[in-house]
């Protein structure tokens, strides 16, 4: 099973949407709280190549992007392969 990390903030509908998809898939993930100005947020920005929005999702260390990117992978039929790695 792939290692999934998701950087989130409170009251973020995109974060909730991404987590809901992962939960429907039945996969475990590590949620990292990353409010603006925090060390976790700086880490997410660095790991994602400069993206400043949340969520930032990583599967086995690979930057996937945000909620829309995660859902696009699902629609394209590519998410299950990444999650199974």
Image (cartoon, rainbow, N blue to C red):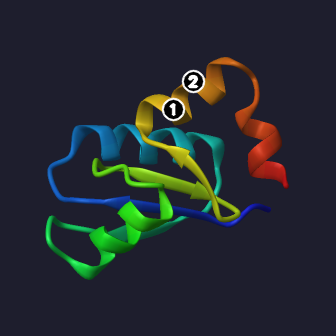
SS for dot 2: helix
- Specify the quadrant that holds the N terminus: bottom right
- In the figure, is residue 65 to the left or right of 12? right
Nearer to us in this view, 20 or 40: 40
Tally of numbered discs: 2
The x, y position of residue 79, in whole percent, is 71, 36
The residue at 30%/38% (across/down) is 14
- In the figure, is residue 1 to the left or right of 59? right
SS for dot 1: helix
- In the figure, is residue 6 to the left or right of 83? left
Question: In terms of image quadrants, where is residue 36?
Answer: bottom left
- In the figure, is residue 14 to the left or right of 84? left
- Specify the quadrant that holds the C terminus: bottom right
As drawn, the label of residue 21 is none
Q: CA distance from mark 2 to mark 1?
A: 5 Å
**Label 1 Cα neighbours within 10 Å, binned few <14 / some 14-19 / many ≥20:** some
Nearer to us in this view, 35 or 43: 43
Give the vertical position of 77 relative to 2 (above or below): above
The residue beneath circle 1 is 69
The x, y position of residue 46, in whole percent, is 42, 66
Kindly check if marks 2 and 1 are in contact, taking CB atoms under 8 A apart as contact.
Answer: yes
The residue at 28%/68% (across/down) is 41
As drawn, the label of residue 72 is 2
Question: In terms of image quadrants, where is residue 44?
Answer: bottom left
**Label 2 Cα neighbours within 10 Å, binned few <14 / some 14-19 / many ≥20:** few
The residue at 53%/28% (across/down) is 71
The x, y position of residue 25, in whole percent, is 64, 42
């Amino acid at each position: 099973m792939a290692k999934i990390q998701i950087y989130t903030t409170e009251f973020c509908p995109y974060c909730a949407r991404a987590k809901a998809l992962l939960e429907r898939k039945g996969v475990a993930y590590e949620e990292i709280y990353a409010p603006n100005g925090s060390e976790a947020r700086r880490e997410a920005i660095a790991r994602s190549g400069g993206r400043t929005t949340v969520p930032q999702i990583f599967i086995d260390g690979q930057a996937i992007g945000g909620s829309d990117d995660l859902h696009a992978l699902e629609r394209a039929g590519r998410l299950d392969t990444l999650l199974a790695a």
